[in-house]
Image (spheres, rainbow, N blue to C red):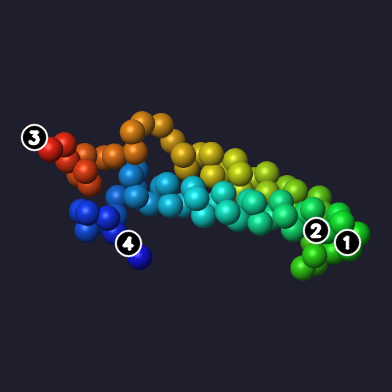
């Protein structure tokens, strides 16, 4: 896994955005599975369409929470060049 220019992983600028992207992808996959379950009119992996919709909603809200505020740089990772 790529660690950037600084060689360390920090929560606010490295891990949190990566976790947010992972949650967005999982939410999009859950939404696609919900649509698939509605279209096929059957269970997908043992879950009903409503369960897939709830999973997509919860994963999307968690992804928004990982977005956070600020510039995305903690100063340790990307020190300002002088």
For label 1, the SS is: helix
Q: Residues within 10 Å of mark 4 (few under 14, many from 20)?
A: few
Read off the residue under disc 3: 82
Element at label 4: loop
Distance from disc 2 to disc 4, alpha carbons, whole Å, reads: 34 Å
Q: CA distance from mark 1 to mark 4?
A: 40 Å
**Does any portion of residue 19 appear in the rendered image?**
yes
Q: Residues within 10 Å of mark 3 (few under 14, many from 20)?
A: few
Res 2 label = 4
Q: Is residue 9 above or below residue 78?
A: below
Q: Which mark is residue 36?
A: 2
In the picture as drawn, the residue positioned furthest to the right comes out as 41
State the image coordinates of residue 43 (x, y, percent, origin top left). 85, 64
Residue at (66% x, 56% y) in the render: 29
Residue 73 located left or right of residue 17: left
Element marked by disc 2: helix
Question: Which quarter of the picture shows residue 46?
Answer: bottom right
Most extreme residue toward the top, as rendered? 70
Badge 3 element: loop
Q: CA distance from mark 3 to mark 4?
A: 26 Å
Residue at the left extreme, as displayed:
82
As drawn, the label of residue 31 is none
- Residue sticking out furthest to the front: 82
Q: Are dots 3 and 4 in contact, CB under 8 Å?
A: no
C-alpha distance separating marks 2 and 1 = 6 Å
Whether the residues at callouts 2 and 1 have beta carbons within 8 Å, the answer is yes
* Lower sequence index among marks 2 and 4: 4
Earlier-in-chain disc, 1 versus 3: 1
In the picture provided, is 21 more to the left or to the right than 35? Answer: left
Q: Which residue is mark 1?
A: 40
Q: Taking 30 as reference, is 16 left or right?
A: left
Instruction: Find the distance from the CA under tag 1 to the CA under tag 3.
Output: 60 Å
């Amino acid at each position: 896994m790529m660690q950037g220019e600084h060689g360390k992983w920090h929560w606010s600028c490295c891990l949190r955005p990566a976790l947010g992207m992972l949650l967005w992808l999982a939410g999009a996959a859950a939404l696609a599975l919900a649509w698939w379950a509605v279209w096929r009119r059957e269970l997908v992996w043992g879950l009903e369409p409503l369960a897939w919709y709830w999973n997509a909603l919860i994963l999307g809200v968690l992804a928004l929470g990982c977005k956070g505020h600020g510039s995305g740089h903690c100063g340790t990772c990307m020190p300002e060049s002088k």
